[in-house]
């Protein structure tokens, strides 16, 4: 950096933090008057602001007043494209109606370090609340610290101590899907699961195992995919080579599309030879061939409800407990063929 560019650069919140000997998150909390910052630390932060000549930008002014009229949305880059788009649309629509903007932070992988940095970035922008749509299983101390002072709603994902949770009971989704196939007369149900590091994948798999155990059936090995149609296709090729398979619970619609194609290419028809049930009920599910039986998740509604819960709290009229897992029964499931 040249001497002239150094003179032109405005002091940042990081400069304040360095001068005060605290973290940027502590500066953020101190400037918006958080009660969790002790008076001596707040005094040091304000003194550092004067020393470095830090000028309050719009985010800093919002931090000091406690209202930025901006919400932070954290998403994962991988996973279901349609579900991610629907959540974003729901959050942005509800926020816009309430006069709020939405700042989006997308992380590339299920990594706590990436999650911490995304939350810290949004906190430094002065967001009034977080909507977290990332399915991390573990939560770090730093994540807890950042979300402690900022209202947070989770959509079936990372649970911090202060977060409020919206979405369906994923274990129940697994049980509902599996029970449907057993009720049709299938004696065994195989499973194509999502990635093990996803909390939703683990819970759907648990529901499948619990349902089979309750029926006195030993679960076969789960076949793990990565939510993509391609991974479903690869696992479908394996399933097609096991002649005794008559029913499969697939953990997402997009993977189910791949499973169905692989079965068809191997000469096994759906649902005559193999019944398929999945989870999500995205818009394309009803137009699959055959139309897909699937457990419904209303991602758009969950995104909008998360905003209502953040802005209106208990007066939002939003049911915070897990929503009922409802099954949309279509043409991909049928009783097993009798020989």
Image (cartoon, helix red, strand yellow):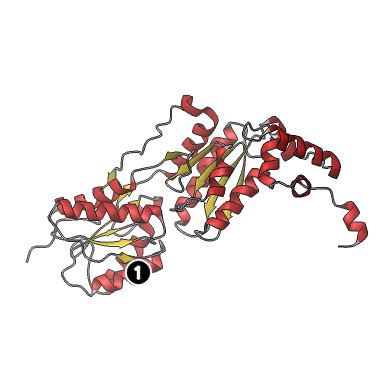
For the N terminus, the quadrant is: bottom right
The residue wearing badge 1 is 233
Identify the residue shown where x is 57% and y is 48%. 142
Identify the residue shown where x is 32% and y is 69%. 235
Q: Residue furthest top?
A: 315
- Vertical side of 217 occupied by 176: above or below: above
Q: Quadrant of residue 70?
A: top right
Q: Position of residue 167 (x, y in %)?
A: 40, 42
Identify the residue shown where x is 57% and y is 57%. 114
Q: Is residue 181 visible?
A: no
Q: Is residue 64 visible?
A: yes
Q: Residue furthest front?
A: 40
Q: Position of residue 97 (x, y in %)?
A: 57, 32
Q: Is residue 73 left or right of residue 242?
A: right
For the C terminus, the quadrant is: bottom left
Camera-side residue of 218 and 332: 218
Camera-side residue of 147 and 272: 147
Element marked by disc 1: helix
Q: Quadrant of residue 25?
A: top right
Camera-side residue of 38 and 128: 38
- Vertical side of 57 occupied by 263: above or below: below
Number of numbered discs present? 1
Report crowding for label 1: few under 14, some 14 to 19, many 20 or more residues within 10 A (C-alpha): many
Q: Residue furthest left?
A: 339
Q: Position of residue 272 (x, y in %)?
A: 18, 62
- Vertical side of 241 occupied by 281: above or below: above
Identify the residue shown where x is 29% and y is 42%. 326
């Amino acid at each position: 950096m040249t001497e002239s560019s150094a003179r032109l650069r405005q002091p940042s919140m990081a400069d304040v933090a360095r001068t005060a000997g605290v973290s940027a998150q502590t500066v953020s909390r101190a400037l918006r008057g958080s009660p969790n910052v002790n008076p001596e630390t707040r005094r040091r932060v304000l003194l550092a602001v004067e020393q470095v000549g830090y000028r309050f930008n719009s985010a800093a002014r919002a931090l000091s007043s406690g209202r930025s009229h901006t919400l932070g949305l954290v998403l994962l880059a991988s996973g279901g494209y349609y579900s991610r788009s629907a959540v974003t649309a729901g959050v942005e629509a509800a926020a816009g109606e309430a006069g709020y903007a939405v700042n989006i932070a997308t992380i590339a992988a299920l990594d706590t370090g990436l999650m911490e940095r995304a939350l810290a970035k949004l906190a430094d922008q002065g967001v009034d609340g977080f909507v977290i749509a990332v399915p991390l299983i573990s939560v770090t101390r730093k994540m807890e610290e950042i979300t402690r002072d900022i209202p947070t709603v989770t959509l079936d994902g990372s649970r911090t101590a202060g977060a409020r949770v919206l979405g369906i009971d994923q274990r129940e989704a697994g049980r509902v899907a599996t029970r449907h196939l057993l009720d049709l007369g299938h004696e065994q149900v195989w499973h194509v699961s999502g990635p093990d590091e996803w909390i939703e994948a683990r819970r759907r798999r648990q529901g499948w195992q619990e349902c089979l155990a309750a029926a006195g059936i030993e679960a076969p090995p789960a076949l793990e995919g990565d939510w993509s149609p391609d991974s479903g296709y690869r696992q479908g090729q394996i399933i097609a080579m096991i002649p005794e398979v008559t029913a499969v619970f697939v953990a997402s619609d997009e993977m189910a599309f791949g499973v169905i194609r692989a079965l068809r290419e191997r000469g096994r028809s759906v649902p005559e030879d193999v019944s398929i049930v999945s989870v999500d009920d995205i818009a394309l599910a009803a137009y699959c061939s055959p139309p897909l039986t699937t457990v419904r998740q209303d991602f758009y509604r969950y995104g909008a409800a998360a905003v209502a819960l953040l802005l209106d709290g208990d007066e939002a009229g939003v049911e915070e407990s897990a929503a009922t897992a409802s099954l949309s029964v279509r043409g991909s499931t049928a009783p097993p063929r009798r020989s």
